[in-house]
Image (cartoon, rainbow, N blue to C red):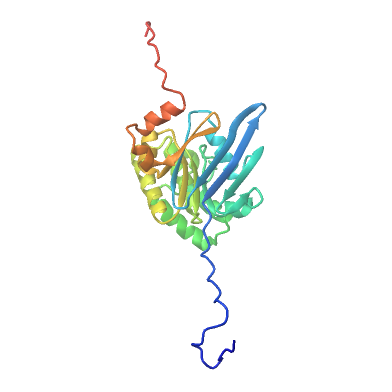
Amino acid sequence: MRVDLENPSEPLPFPAAAEPPPLQTPPALVVRDLRKYYGAKAAVDGLSLTVPRGCFFGFLGPNGAGKTTTIKMLMGVSTPNSGDIEILGLSMPEKSVEIKRQIGLVPEDTLLFDHLTGQEYMEFAGRIYGLPSAMTRERTRELLALFEMDGQGRKMIGEYSKGMRKRVAMAAALLHRPQLFLMDEPFEGVDAVGARLMKNILLDLVSKGATIFLTSHVLEVVERLCDRVAIISDGKLVVDDTMANLRSGSESLEEIFVRVVGGGRASENLEWL
């Protein structure tokens, strides 16, 4: 077949190359068959999870179920015995440094430096994340104001209440505009006003595309905030579903939680009480 190269409308003798499919953004978090043992005891036993991007994800379980152990493995401070972790498409622990640059961490125990002021701690966090000094100072000022702590930035952290420590820890986790937040009991010890403020900030972050992985014992908070919920018991996954599906039944999240973790047994009254 002869092709007229001077006539661009002439069809080519072979099909045009197909456009490549759009690149799919990997999930915020993927965990496959994760296991962690302490001696013969499995704290996390074959856990598999996928957390989509832009999701407010609640990670629930009774005391000792393996929630904090899982969070520590996701943070890279505890090594699993087996299984795979991918965060923002990167493998942990191989890409741990790159991952930590893109996530914000609020651990259950806010291990802050008591002999630094809130402002100094924020500036220290900015240096850890490699932010320019001028940017860190400006963001510190804005974040302390956002968390209604602009009058507390010059006080020593050792003088802060537990709720104030939680606020400054969350503010520091926001400095580098992370894509994913790992939060272990962020509302514990926070008063109602502070909790409402923190919830509103987190909801705003999710509306802008961030992903939040949250543990909490306050099921009403989880039910109100989260898009999706996973429940573990004895280190095993027992529920993984959207809040919309869970709400479609007659049970509340609390009733589902009690049923699946085996806490529904009726207790006897003690005669002497």
Considering only vertical position in the picture, is 215 above or below 178? above
Q: Position of residue 236 (x, y in %)?
A: 54, 32
Is the C terminus in the top left, top right, bottom left or bottom right quadrant?
top left
* Rendered image quadrant of residue 235: top right
In this orientation, does residue 230 appear?
Answer: no
Of 21 and 184, the residue lying toward us: 21
Instruction: Look at the picture and state if 213 lies above or below 46.
Output: below
Identify the residue at horizontal 42%, vertical 43% (top origin).
228
Task: Report the residue that reaches farthest toward the front.
Answer: 1
Pick the front one: 9 or 146: 9
Image side of residue 213 versus residue 47, left or right: left
At x 60%, y 39%, the residue is 34
Image quarter hosting the N terminus: bottom right
Q: Is residue 157 rendered to the left or right of residue 272?
A: right
Q: Which residue sits at x=40%, y=43%?
A: 226
Image vertical order of residue 141 relative to residue 66, above or below: below
The reply to whether residue 53 is in sight is yes
State the image quarter where residue 6 is shown.
bottom right
